[in-house]
Amino acid sequence: MKVKWTPLALAELQKTTRYISKEFGKTAKSKFINEVSSITQMIGREPFAGKIEPSLEKRAKTYRSFVVSRLNKIIYFIDDNHIEIADFWALRQNPDKLTNRI
């Protein structure tokens, strides 16, 4: 199934990638990008593998998530013909902000 990123999710991913590169170097950035890519590909093959996101359970869409590098989550939902990554969420934030953001 095709995976699409929302502008919000893509902007957050880029911001996180720039931070990792600046603070930890190119090797850490490359490792992070590879992990995100692997998870994204896996979501495309197995869309129901992610756990249902508890803070978004009351939404009309069923949001699922995968943790990336222990500090971020890929939050997505399954549409009719594709998977949409709705957010790339930093886990250090207040989870209540997530419900207001998506």
Image (tube, rainbow, N blue to C red):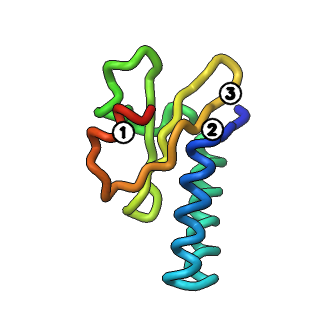
**Numbered mark located on residue 6 in the image:** 2
**Tag 3–tag 2 contact (CB < 8 Å):** no
Tell me if 53 is positioned left or right of 13 in this view. Answer: left
Height in image: 80 above or below 83?
above
Which residue was labeled with disc 3? 82
The amino acid beneath tag 1 is Leu
Question: Residue at 57% of width from left, 26% of height from top?
Answer: 78
Where's residue 97, x and y in %?
Answer: 32, 41
Where's residue 87, x and y in %?
Answer: 51, 42
Height in image: 42 above or below 32?
above
**Numbered mark located on residue 98 in the image:** 1
Q: Earlier in the sequence, mark 2 or mark 1?
A: 2
Height in image: 18 above or below 59?
below
The amino acid beneath tag 2 is Thr
Question: Residue at 64% of width from left, 74% of height from top?
Answer: 30
Q: Residues within 10 Å of mark 1 (few under 14, many from 20)?
A: some
Where's residue 62, x and y in %?
Answer: 44, 23
Q: Quadrant of residue 27?
A: bottom right
Tell me if 86 is positioned left or right of 2 in this view. Answer: left
Gap between marks 1 and 3, in whole Å? 22 Å
SS at badge 2:
loop
Where's residue 102, x and y in %?
Answer: 45, 32
SS at badge 3:
strand
Residue 57 vs residue 20, the one in the foreground = 20
Gap between marks 2 and 1, in whole Å? 15 Å
